[in-house]
Image: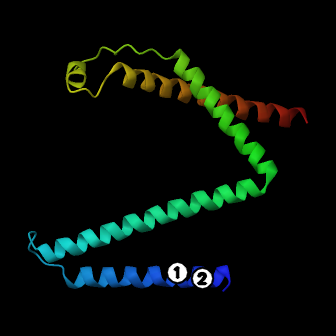
Amino acid sequence: MKLGKALNIMLIGFLVVSAFLIISLLSNLSDNDADAVMGAWIDSNLVWCYILFGLSIAAALLLGLANTLSDPQALKKGLMATGFMVVIVGIGYALSDSSIPQFYGVEKFVADGTLTATVSKWIGTGLYVTYTLFILAVLAIAGSSVSRILK
């Protein structure tokens, strides 16, 4: 059996299961919020959505990885982009400070543990990375305009 035919059969199976779950949910809707049957069908539909979402993410990642690995030039560009991002994040991490900022209401976040020195360090890293990428984008736009004028 060819791969395309197997994929079509699989997609039809997904469609049949999805249609069955939707029809079953719609036939079991009620005004009673405590209806256990309706809650079970809602849960079943949500689980099915999570499964489909996970499968689509896995397919996108695997097919993208297979496409990248099959083309050495794309692999080289992908590794260069990944290395560039690692350097930018590393610079941002090195420049960021782990001290807790002082603002109105900070005591609440420190007391419940949502704002720690580590969280503060990563927030600073994210800010430095954002600023750096913004500056690089502005320079790239200006550089392309200048190079176009010089040509």
Separation (CA) of disc 2 from disc 1: 6 Å
x and y percentages locating residue 71 in the rendered image: 79, 55
The numbered mark at residue 6 is 2
Disc 1 residue crowd, few under 14, some 14–19, many 20+, Cα 10 Å: few
Outermost residue, front side = 1
Residue 80 picture quarter: top right
Q: Is residue 129 above or below residue 40?
A: above
Q: Nearer the viewer, residue 135 or 11?
A: 11
Q: Is residue 35 above or below residue 112?
A: below
Q: Is residue 77 above or below residue 8?
A: above
Disc 2 residue crowd, few under 14, some 14–19, many 20+, Cα 10 Å: few
The numbered mark at residue 10 is 1
Indicate the quadrant containing the C terminus: top left, top right, bottom left or bottom right.
top right
Indicate the quadrant containing the N terminus: top left, top right, bottom left or bottom right.
bottom right
Horizontal side, residue 72 vs residue 13: left or right: right
Q: Is residue 134 above or below residue 70?
A: above
Q: Residue at x 71, y 41 (%)?
A: 79
x and y percentages locating residue 10 in the rendered image: 52, 80
Q: Residue at x 59, y 21 (%)?
A: 91
Q: Amino acid at mark 1?
A: Met
x and y percentages locating residue 115 in the rendered image: 30, 24
Q: Nearer the viewer, residue 117 or 133?
A: 117
x and y percentages locating residue 57 in the rendered image: 51, 59
Q: Amino acid at mark 2?
A: Ala
**Mark 1: secondary structure:** helix
Horizontal side, residue 129 vs residue 104: left or right: right
Q: Are marks 2 and 1 in contact (CB under 8 Å)?
A: yes
Q: Residue at x 49, y 24 (%)?
A: 125
Horizontal side, residue 115 vs residue 65: left or right: left
